[in-house]
Amino acid sequence: FSIVYIIEGLLKLQKDVMKMKENTTALDAFRKYKNLVLRTAYCCVGDYSEAEDITQEVFLTLHNKQPEIRDDEHLKAWLLRCTMNRGRNYRKSWKQKGRLSLDEIAELTDEKTECEYGELRNMVLALPEKYAVVLYLYYYEGYQIPEIARLLGKRTSTVGSLLRRGREKLKSE
């Protein structure tokens, strides 16, 4: 009786190990794209600790849902889309609750001026999301307009217009 129990336990353990080996997509994606996802999340929310949380949630979603991924470019697009959606959800929830992020509290209490990069990042984040996302993907991640259009599911001319209008809004501020 006890030997049968042990054998059944070993077989179950072996199946679990095989299952873990089969699903390495999330781990491989994390190793390859963790910095990209973290930078994107940070650009969306402007708070490093929240960006880390969003990054973790994105890779957990990839692991749990196991979407059909055709190739590396499709995986990268899926990760960016998921990250931007989570960033959007985060920003909505904080606006509804009327809370300040840790970065905003630090800005209120700290008399030091920010560096130009920080000011520019804050200006981009202050833009409406449709402009901020396009500007971020174009300037920070180096995507071309047709690639951004594919990622966002928009026409190339729309992305070009959003990029132009976003630049104009930045110049006017």
Image (cartoon, grey):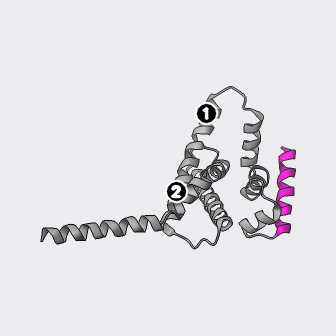
Within 10 angstroms of label 2, few (less than 14), some, or many (20 or more) residues? some
Give the numbered dot on residue 59: none
What secondary structure is found at the residue carrying circle 2? helix
> The disc labelled 2 sits on which kind of residue?
Glu
The answer, for residue 100, to whether it is visible in the render is no
- The answer to whether mark 2 and mark 1 are in CB contact below 8 A is no
In the rendered image, residue 49, in percent from the top left (x then y), is placed at: 55, 43
Point 64% across, 28% down: residue: 110
What secondary structure is found at the residue carrying circle 1? helix
Q: Which of the image's four quarters has the C terminus? A: top right
In the rendered image, residue 97, in percent from the top left (x then y), is placed at: 55, 51
Would you place residue 101 above or below residue 85 in this image? Answer: above
- The stretch of residues the image draws in magenta is 156-173
Picture quadrant of residue 1: bottom left
In the rendered image, residue 15, in percent from the top left (x then y), is placed at: 35, 70
The answer, for residue 6, to whether it is visible in the render is yes
Principal secondary structure, stretch drawn in magenta: helix
**Residue tagged 1:** 106
> The disc labelled 1 sits on which kind of residue?
Ala
Give the numbered dot on residue 57: 2
Q: 95 or 169: nearer the eye?
A: 169
Image check: 47 left or right of 139?
A: left
Picture quadrant of residue 21: bottom left
In the rendered image, residue 77, in percent from the top left (x then y), is placed at: 67, 64
